[in-house]
């Protein structure tokens, strides 16, 4: 185990890598526009460093990427929540210096010798290079306020956040540690589903993670699931849906089957806002929709209630 | 002939010739020559069947698993079990006929059976939603499993579904949660549990009733994280590449056994379960009884620990030893 280092990365938005069912295609990639011509094409001031401008998918405005860092990657104009990398998420939630990463050395293997159009081995290598991460989840133990928690954060930029053996194993070990050390468990999900390249091994991660949660629940330890844009299929139909509390970020697209699959199968018109966090809230499927800037505060508040019985009685003198 | 698969054709042609010869022989008794020919063809049918059915490609097995004449859950409830007492409904919203369940006897043992159910014709398929369950199906299954847990009845699940239903209502009533809760709750059931994949094991929709002490699979059934067509559409950008995807995904009974993902393969009659459904039912019963007898010997803590460990062990990855700082 080691303390993580935080490196800044570009926004992890890319094409979805669907697995159990393809997630909706509406999660299009925002276009990165370099050095847009502002102020009628006047020459740039020399003291402004060159940076990336990002076009907000929702309102269409260009946002300077430094500004997005300050807002936790939420559009300052329309509050659209961009996807955020797991290490930035740790920075936004965990007390500085308290995060101890677990199982950083777990690496996926091509157990099936998967021969598709691109090999799994090359897919893994490309994604490792692109993200600087070994797989699609970061796990560890750290302090959120005064609560020591077991925290897992998925990474959509790594093969669409898909769950293979490594994701399943790391989440399972995290939950088992929570059970063993009596820690609340929090998992922040974003995933296209199970990782096809690992065949049935990926499907079995659903059973494995939920099995670990069965024992966490039996020990009456809290589990909070946070759903972020976007969370689908194998992850949604396993650990993401069985939280004591289930929270979601505004506008996040969340579901079992992808919207396109549903449309193709049923030939039905999809209701407005279908499969958004707000739609789930209206249908009674989640506890609350929480703005990213409020997440830490709310997690602390919820944990205060969920762990109340673990507080030792004040000493009597 | 209706429902004939390409690779079944040589056997079908031979059988047709045999029938013709027999008819001829009964109309015009001509003697020894015909009798010899009949015996020759009978041998040839068995040889050809063996040749074809021991060398099936994964995609051919997928076609067999989806064969419209293949025995479904209710057929096995009639052939492998007796006294099926169906129990309906999830007690919350609806009766989902894509899932059937209730009490039944397996040999002398009283059990609860739950299975996904396809229809054999259009009308029945509409009633059964083609074997694809809504949230209510998974919640009915859990209700019956809790009933079995409460009254100490072993649970047998029969899996035959292309997958859970992708629909607006299914999403609105949280099908992901219905499956996920089953995955969690099945881990703690205090009775022996066995799942048998009898046809299609379609992803999360199959796993939703598949977290059991033993996972068995029929010889020509398949169990996969995604349909071969779905995988082909994503990775090859072409649904017609499904045979390639079926090969790559390692979804056949033999592959799954080799990878340790299932515990036992139940043999089917030569030619597939649909050619001799009664014999297929008999084999299923024997296999279930054998596994159940083993599970019934285990003390409860051991049963639960082994169930957890069974799924806990599934996953392949490499783990390098971190260098000490």
Image: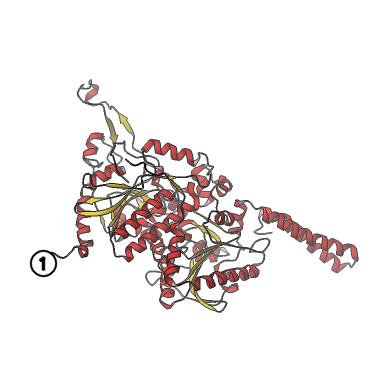
Going by the picture, which residue comes out furthest to the front?
Answer: B324
Render colour scheme: secondary structure
Q: Position of residue B110 (x, y in %)?
A: 51, 78
Please give the name of the residue rendered at 60% of the width and 59% of the height, measured from the top-left corner.
B220
Numbered-mark total: 1
Q: Nearer the viewer, residue A153 or A273?
A: A153
Q: Position of residue B250 (x, y in %)?
A: 55, 51
Please name whichever residue, B176 or B156, is drawn nearer the observer in this view of the structure: B156
A93 horizontally vs B220: left or right:
left
Q: Secondary structure at mark 1?
A: loop
Q: In the displayed structure, would residue A207 be above or below residue B86?
A: above
Quadrant for the C terminus of chain B, please: top left
Residue A129 lies left or right of residue A90; in this view the side is right
Pointer 1: what residue?
Answer: A316
Q: Residue furthest top?
A: A43
Q: Position of residue A188 (x, y in %)?
A: 31, 51
Q: Does any portion of residue A260 appear in the rendered image?
A: no
Q: Determine the chain carrying the residue at label 1.
A: A
| Residue sitting farthest toward the left | A317
Residue B219: image quadrant is bottom right
Nearer-the-camera pick, B149 or A95: A95
Q: Please say if B80 is above or below B312.
A: below
**Mark 1 burial class by Cα count in 10 Å: few <14, some 14-19, many 20+:** few
- Between residues B110 and B123, which one lies in front from this camera angle? B110
> Is A34 positioned to the left or the right of B97 in the image?
left
Q: Quadrant of the N terminus of chain B?
A: bottom right
Residue B23, x across and y down, in percent: 82, 66
**Residue B51 visible in rendering:** yes
């Amino acid at each position: 185990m080691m303390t993580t280092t935080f490196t800044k990365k570009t926004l992890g938005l890319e094409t979805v890598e669907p697995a159990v069912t393809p997630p909706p295609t509406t999660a299009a990639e925002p276009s990165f526009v370099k050095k847009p011509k502002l102020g009628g094409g006047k020459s740039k001031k020399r003291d402004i460093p060159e940076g990336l401008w990002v076009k907000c998918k929702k309102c269409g405005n260009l946002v300077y990427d430094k500004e997005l860092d300050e807002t936790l990657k939420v559009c300052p104009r329309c509050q659209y929540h961009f996807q955020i990398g797991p290490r930035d998420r740790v920075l936004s939630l965990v007390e500085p210096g308290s995060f101890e990463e677990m199982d950083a050395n777990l690496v996926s293997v091509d157990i099936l010798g998967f021969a598709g159009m691109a090999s799994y081995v090359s897919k893994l290598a490309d994604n490792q290079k692109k993200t600087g991460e070994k797989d699609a989840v970061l796990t560890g133990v750290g302090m959120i306020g005064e609560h020591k928690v077991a925290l897992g954060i998925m990474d959509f930029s790594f093969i669409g956040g898909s769950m293979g053996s490594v994701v399943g194993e790391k989440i399972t070990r995290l939950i088992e540690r929570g059970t063993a050390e009596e820690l609340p468990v929090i998992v922040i999900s974003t995933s296209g589903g199970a990782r096809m390249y690992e065949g049935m091994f990926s499907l079995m991660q659903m059973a494995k993670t939920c099995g670990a949660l069965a024992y966490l629940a039996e020990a009456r330890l809290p589990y909070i699931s946070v759903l972020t844009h976007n969370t689908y299929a194998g992850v949604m139909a396993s650990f993401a849906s069985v939280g004591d509390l289930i929270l979601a970020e505004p506008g996040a697209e969340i579901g079992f089957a992808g919207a396109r699959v549903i449309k193709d199968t049923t030939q039905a018109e999809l209701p407005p806002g279908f499969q958004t966090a707000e739609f789930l809230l209206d249908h009674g499927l989640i506890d609350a929709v929480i703005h990213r800037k409020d997440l830490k505060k709310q997690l602390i508040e919820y944990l205060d209630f969920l762990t109340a019985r673990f507080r030792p009685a004040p000493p009597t003198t | 002939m209706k429902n004939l698969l390409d690779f079944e054709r040589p056997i079908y042609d031979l059988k047709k010739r045999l029938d013709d010869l027999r008819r001829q022989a009964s109309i015009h008794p001509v003697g020894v020559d015909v009798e010899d020919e009949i015996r020759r063809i009978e041998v040839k049918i068995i040889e050809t069947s063996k040749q074809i059915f021991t060398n099936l490609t994964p995609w051919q097995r997928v076609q067999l698993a989806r064969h419209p004449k293949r025995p479904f859950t209710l057929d096995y409830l009639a052939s492998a079990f007796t006294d099926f007492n169906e129990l309906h409904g999830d007690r919350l919203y609806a009766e989902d006929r894509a899932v059937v369940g209730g009490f039944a006897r397996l040999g002398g043992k009283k059990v609860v059976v739950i299975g996904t159910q396809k229809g054999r014709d259009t009308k029945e398929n509409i009633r059964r939603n083609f074997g694809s369950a809504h949230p209510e199906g998974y919640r009915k299954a859990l209700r019956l499993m809790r009933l079995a847990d409460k009254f100490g009845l072993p649970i047998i699940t029969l899996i035959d579904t292309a997958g859970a239903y992708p629909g607006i209502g299914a999403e609105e009533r949280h099908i992901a949660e219905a499956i996920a809760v089953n995955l969690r709750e099945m881990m703690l059931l205090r009775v022996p549990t066995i799942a048998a994949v009898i046809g299609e094991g379609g992803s999360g929709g199959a796993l939703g009733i598949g977290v059991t002490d033993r996972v068995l699979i029929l010889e020509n059934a398949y169990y996969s994280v995604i349909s071969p067509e779905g995988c082909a559409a994503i990775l090859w950008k072409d649904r017609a590449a499904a045979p390639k995807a079926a090969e790559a995904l390692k979804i056949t009974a033999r592959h799954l056994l080799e990878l340790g993902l299932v515990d036992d393969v139940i043999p089917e009659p030569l030619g597939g379960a649909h050619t001799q459904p009664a014999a297929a039912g008999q084999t299923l019963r024997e296999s279930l009884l054998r596994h159940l007898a083993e599970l019934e010997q285990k003390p409860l803590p051991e049963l639960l620990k082994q169930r957890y460990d069974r799924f806990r062990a599934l996953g392949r990855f490499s783990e390098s030893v971190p260098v000490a700082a």
